[in-house]
Image (tube, grey):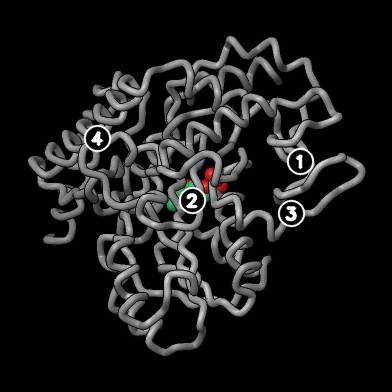
Amino acid sequence: MLQDFFHTCKSNQFNVIGYPVSADFNYQELDKFWQFSFNNCGDWAVESIYSLNTFRFEKEVMRYFAEKFSIPFETSWGYVTNGGTEGNMYGCYLAREIFPDGILYFSENTHYSVAKIVKLLRIEHRVVRSLPNGEIDYEDLQRQIALNETEHPIIFTNVGTTLHGATDNLDKIKAILKYAGIQREDYYLHVDAAFHGMILPFVDAPQPYSFADDIDSISVSGHKMIGAPIPCGVVLTKKEYVENISVAVDYIVANDKTITGSRNGITPLMLWYAIKSSTEQEKELRVKRCLRLAEYATEKMNEKGVPAWRNPNSVIVVFPTPSEAVWRKYGLANSAEYAHIIITGHMIDNIQFLDQLIEDVALDLKEDETMTVA
Ligand SMILES: Cc1ncc(COP(=O)(O)O)c(C=O)c1O
């Protein structure tokens, strides 16, 4: 069974174009660490009596992301999560602890897990309409904020939505709150940067996305743009917010500040390795190559009559959903109207596959048009 499964995995290794997954990673140097029972339970900043932890690596990972997201390391705190969802939940949890009477606003294009998070945390929430490109509908947000249902709005923003790679304009959102007379200390701004969080720091003209733009917390997935064999991510926030939820636990002789008890010790090691095994210039080059390839795919589809498009600084190319035969063949994620392809690291050396896909999508659309006319 294992051998069979291995062959299946090998033949599908790079067959992930519909999803935000980079498959160009190599963590073989870490193979020797699989024999240890790691557990990062607790806070990496506090020495643990459980010696098989990877706290020293987690600390360096958090130092790296603090720099990437423009917050002084000393005033920040965060940890390596199980993925973007946990980071988003953590941001919402902190916000709710700060503003128990807050209402959380998120756009209809927000990742589906947020609906689950507000249910689990019992946070009152409002769904805001989305614009056709996937950004939050600023007018609808303004209208809902003006209803004045809470003195403490919690705004859940997207830096790269799942389907369209759209980034909400944080400046516009802050202006809406200011216009409504809500002081900065009376609202909370969380950023879901699951995928684009490791794109925007490397582009020439990023949209606002970081603590330099006055956010309160940010969540990024590690297995998406970076790439990892195990889902993981980081969440980063201001140290002062975390004190609100910190609980001293005798059993681990530490303060518990995270959502889960036991925590993965291998993924901090992986993220540390991913960060250290390439220079920042190499990371930038990889991101820029992905963006160029996404532009190539968009233009080529347009030339062939497919009305494909993408949002600024996004590697997600959106186009009308092709027939089931085509989306199944390529494993394309799709909704009723749109499908998309996502250009990540391993696609850089896979242009023939991309060309074939574009050819099939264009042909499919032509056949569909012919049938409609007939
Ligand atoms: C925008 C966005 N947010 C959150 C998530 C959830 O992240 P994860 O799958 O790492 O939990 C995703 C996953 O695709 C996403 O695209």
Closer to the chain start, of discs 4 and 1, is 1
Amino acid identity at mark 2: Ile
Amino acid identity at mark 4: Leu
User: Who's the residue at 48% across and 77% down the image?
Assistant: 126
User: Who's the residue at 42% across and 75% down the image?
Assistant: 183
Residue, disc 3: 246
**Residue 305 percent location from the top left of the image:** 10, 46
**Which is more foreground, mark 1 or mark 3?**
3
Residue, disc 2: 218
Q: With 52 as the anchor, is 328 left or right in this view?
A: left
**Which is more foreground, mark 2 or mark 3?**
3
Residue, disc 1: 42
Closer to the chain start, of discs 4 and 2, is 2
How far separated are the C-alphas under marks 1 and 3? 10 Å
Residue, disc 4: 291
| Mark 3 sits near ligand 1, with its Cβ under 8 Å away | no
How far separated are the C-alphas under marks 1 and 2? 20 Å
How far separated are the C-alphas under marks 4 and 1? 38 Å
